[in-house]
Image: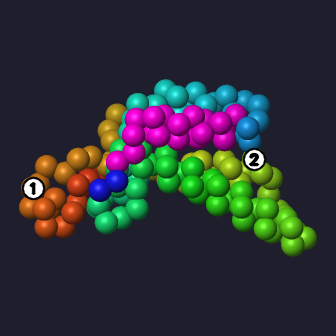
Amino acid sequence: MYTPTEEKILSNWDTFLGYILDYVKGDRATTLYEFYNSRAERIITAPYSTKKTDVNCFPGGYIDHVNLVIECALDLHNVWSSKSSQISYTKEELIFSAINHQLGLLGTSNEEYLIPNTNDWFVKNRGAFIVTGKQL
């Protein structure tokens, strides 16, 4: 199973925060930046998925995934713009949506949603290293 280095995880975090600073404006940017920074430890280390065969099931997988979604959103925006398509959103709206599209995977202020699996059978036989916490 792939596990990124600490440097890569922190680099991904810096990239993520850069998207907020570069694309989100005014009070919305301040609020978003403060929201994510106040939960930085959980977010930086969060996986994206629950099974080792799924995408980004490793520490830092959540931010890695969100950054990829942001990059893809920008790429698609550029393609649509180059084809003279009518764009009915701002780049700020696009990036804001991409940044927050899987926010629920982080849980609540008090409880994480994706937690390490303590059931050895499921880890060994199903590759379920992570389980979902109680319904939020």
Residue 120: image tag: 1
Relative to 100, is 76 on the left or the right? Answer: right
Image coords of residue 40 (percent x, y): 46, 31
How crowded pointer 1 is (Cα within 10 Å; few <14, some 14-19, many 20+) is rated as: few
- Mark 2 lies on residue: 92
Q: Which residues are magenta?
A: 3-21
Quadrant in which the N terminus is drawn: bottom left
> For mark 2, does the 10 Å Cα neighbourhood hold few (<14), some (14 to 19), or many (20 or more) residues?
some
Q: Amino acid at mark 2?
A: Glu
Residue at the (33%, 42%) spot, across then down:
112
Instruction: Please report the residue visible at 72 percent of the width from the left and 65 percent of the height from the top.
Output: 76
User: Mark 1 or 2 closer to N-term?
Assistant: 2
Q: Amino acid at mark 1?
A: Asp
Residue at (19%, 51%) from the top-left corner?
A: 117
Classify mark 2: helix, strand or loop: helix
Callout 1 secondary element: helix
Majority secondary structure in the magenta region: helix
Estimate the x, y position of residue 54 in percent, counting from the top left.
Answer: 36, 64
- Does residue 30 appear to the left or right of 57 in the view shown? right
Left or right of 74? Residue 39 is left
